Image (spheres, rainbow, N blue to C red):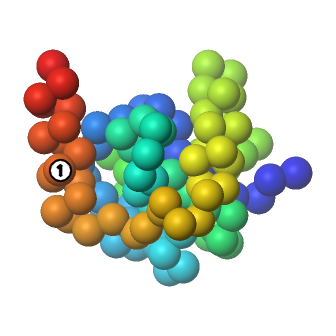
Amino acid sequence: MIDAYVITRLCQDCLHGDCVDVCPVDCIVKVDGEFPNQLFITEDCISCGCCVPECPEEAIFAPYDVPAEYEDDIELNQKATANRPNIRVPSRLDLIEMLQRKDSAA
């Protein structure tokens, strides 16, 4: 059983980053590469739940609470965070750049 919390696709193109600010172990990351424009949670998650109430998109769930329509996001989260060289804790500037990429793609 996976203990790390999961950020679902509801986070795509989110700019808030409040979840990043409250994470005591810096496990909420941005992933460079072919993955969706969202944040992910690494296996370093201690399942404290601090991030959940901070997410205005209500995109973060305990692995056993992920709604059925977002269950695919559990595997996506695992794949996205498996390649350590491509992940980093995002800054507020990273979040702004994520939004700019979304706007330019529209």
Residue 44 in the image, given as x and y percentages of width and height:
66, 71
Label 1 sits on a secondary structure element that is helix
**On the picture, is 43 further left or further right than 18?**
right
Q: Residue at x 17, y 50 (%)?
A: 97
Task: Report if residue 97 is visible in the image.
Answer: yes
At x 29%, y 38%, the residue is: 13
Q: Residue at x 68, y 64 (%)?
A: 43
Q: Position of residue 12 (x, y in %)?
A: 36, 36
Residue 51 left/right relative to 12:
right
Amino acid type at mark 1: Glu
Instruction: Report the residue that reaches farthest toward the bottom.
Output: 24
Which of 88 and 21 lies nearest the eye of the viewer? 88
**Quadrant location of the C terminus?**
top left
Q: Is residue 11 left or right of residue 70?
A: left
Compared across the picture, whether 84 is left or right of 16 comes to right
Question: Which residue is labeled 1 in the image?
Answer: 97
Depth check: give the residue in front, 77 or 67: 77
Which picture quadrant has residue 22? bottom left
